[in-house]
């Protein structure tokens, strides 16, 4: 059973390291994009490349630079030069196809600017006029006073005021913050358990002066707090944190909270910068 928990723990840690660190590093180097472009280019059958290259040789419509390279490497042998040209031309066409697929991916993922209609909405606190896109439900933060409210520009600019959540005890945390806080609590529990087993600490009991019991209770409360904050970030009720008490099922909850992205902007539990444990 301990082996199973260790494998699950290191599996989660490895996945988190890839998801938040290695994946972004690989993306920044362009490795993933080049690999996708290479595989996309490989989808074209080799016969199509060779047919195109041989047609160029037959029609005399060769690329002068490649033909000169093939002629030089063949040392003037026309038959060898033609065969070498076909090989060089196929490699060049594959490289061109890879670059084309790569360029198409950049275009698809890029920003396509477009001109959209605008409307004017007055801030409900300071009265300044704010220009907003027409036909959308928007979470607005006033550029002058910082007041936040919601406006529906698709239905006569209807304004909805947010409730005051400044006194909210538990706020919202994102996946990365949840991962580090959860990992820290697990490591502390492992250390305390090891010290109890080795005799460095007394066995947990209901005695009010029993340090391990107090520490474990504090860690349990802390675990509930970070679970509630993460659930609120995905716009779920904190009552779902009671799953934390169910063995094995709580591992599924941890994986869910590590994978599911949080709400963009403000949700029913407020923005990401309100309350305790509010790092986003």
Image: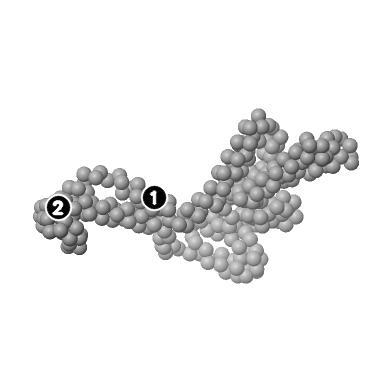
Mark with earlier residue (1, 2): 1
What residue do we see at 20% from left, 60% from top? 69
**Around disc 2, counting alpha carbons within 10 Å, would you say few (fewer than 14), some (14 to 19), or many (20 or more)?**
some
Residue under label 1, please give it.
Answer: 35
Q: Which numbered tag is attached to residue 16? A: none
Q: Evaluate whether residue 193 shows in this view.
A: yes
Residue 209 position by quadrant: top right
Q: Is residue 121 above or below residue 230?
A: below
What residue do we see at 52% from left, 51% from top? 22
Number of numbered discs: 2
What residue do we see at 47% from left, 57% from top? 28
In the structure shown, which secondary structural element does the residue marked by tag 2 occupy? helix
**Around disc 1, counting alpha carbons within 10 Å, would you say few (fewer than 14), some (14 to 19), or many (20 or more)?**
few
> Does residue 61 appear left or right of residue 165 in this picture?
left
> Does residue 161 appear left or right of residue 108 in this picture?
right
Percent position of residue 13, x then y: 60, 44
In the structure shown, which secondary structural element does the residue marked by tag 1 occupy? helix
User: Foreground residue, 86 or 75?
Assistant: 75
């Amino acid at each position: 059973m301990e082996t199973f928990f260790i494998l699950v723990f290191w599996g989660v840690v490895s996945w988190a390291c890839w998801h938040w660190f290695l994946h972004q590093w690989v993306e920044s180097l362009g490795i993933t994009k080049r690999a996708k472009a290479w595989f996309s280019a490989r989808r074209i059958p080799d016969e199509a490349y060779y047919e195109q290259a041989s047609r160029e040789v037959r029609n005399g419509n060769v690329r002068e630079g490649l033909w000169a390279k093939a002629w030089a490497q063949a040392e003037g042998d026309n038959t060898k030069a033609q065969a070498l040209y076909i090989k060089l031309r196929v490699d060049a066409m594959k490289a061109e196809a890879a670059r084309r697929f790569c360029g198409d991916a950049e275009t698809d993922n890029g920003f396509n600017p477009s001109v959209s209609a605008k409307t004017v909405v007055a801030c409900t606190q300071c009265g300044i006029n704010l220009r907003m896109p027409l036909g959308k439900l928007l979470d607005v933060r006033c550029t002058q006073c910082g007041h936040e409210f919601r406006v529906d520009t698709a239905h006569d600019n209807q304004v909805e005021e947010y409730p005051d959540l400044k006194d909210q005890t538990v706020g919202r945390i994102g996946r990365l913050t949840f991962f580090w806080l959860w990992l820290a609590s697990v490591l502390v529990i492992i250390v305390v358990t090891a010290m109890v087993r080795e005799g460095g600490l007394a066995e947990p009991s209901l005695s009010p002066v029993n340090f391990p019991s107090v520490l474990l209770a504090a860690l349990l409360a802390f675990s509930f707090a970070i679970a509630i904050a993460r659930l609120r970030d995905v716009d779920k009720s904190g009552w779902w944190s009671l799953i934390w008490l169910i063995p094995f099922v709580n591992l599924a909850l941890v994986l869910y909270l590590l994978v599911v992205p949080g709400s963009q902007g403000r949700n029913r539990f407020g923005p990401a910068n309100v309350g305790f444990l509010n790092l986003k």
